[in-house]
Image: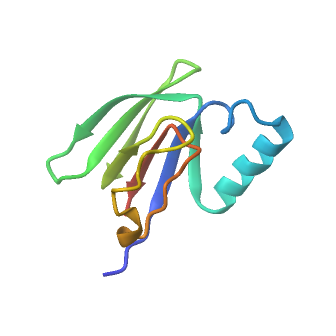
Amino acid sequence: MLYTLTLHSAVQPLPLRGFDEECRQFISEQYQVSGLNIHSESTPTCIEKQSNGSFTLHVKKKSGGEEAIEGLDTVLMATGRSPNTQNMNLEKVCLLPLCFCTIAWVSR
């Protein structure tokens, strides 16, 4: 079975806080070019499991608004730059750790 993955990430205004600003901007642009949807300045507030088995992630925007991201198959959470995923066999499902993200969620 072939799956199409859509990746999302909630981060500060730019990923890699503490790094060079120009580098951060370039990396953010490259993430988006490669298909990562960045929801900047968003804080996850709630994850709901729907009756069809999918998930809806609710995020609060720094501007005060809220957003619901629906139809997610999987939600992965990682904080920091070095996720502890060595024993999760992510390579068997063709996923590599996203060491830059605060939270990533996947929909097929």
Residue placed at 42% from the left, 70% from the top? 94
Residue placed at 65% from the left, 54% from the top? 32
Number of numbered markers: 0
Left or right, 19 with reference to 81: right
Q: Position of residue 99 (x, y in %)?
A: 55, 47
Left or right, 52 with reference to 46: left
In the rendered image of this protein, does residue 54 appear above or below residue 18? below
In the rendered image of this protein, does residue 99 appear above or below residue 30? above
Q: Position of residue 63 (x, y in %)?
A: 59, 20
Residue placed at 38% from the left, 73% from the top? 3
Q: Residue furthest right?
A: 22
Q: Residue furthest top?
A: 64
Q: Which of the image's four quarters has the N terminus?
A: bottom left
Q: Residue furthest front?
A: 87
Q: Quadrant of residue 89?
A: bottom left
Q: Which of the image's four quarters has the C terminus?
A: bottom left
Q: Position of residue 69 (x, y in %)?
A: 40, 43
Q: Residue furthest left?
A: 51
4 and 70: which is toward the camera: 4
Specify how the rendered protein is coloured.
Answer: rainbow
Residue placed at 43% from the left, 46% from the top? 84
Q: Position of residue 102 (x, y in %)?
A: 51, 37
In the rendered image of this protein, does residue 100 appear above or below residue 40? below
96 and 53: which is toward the camera: 96
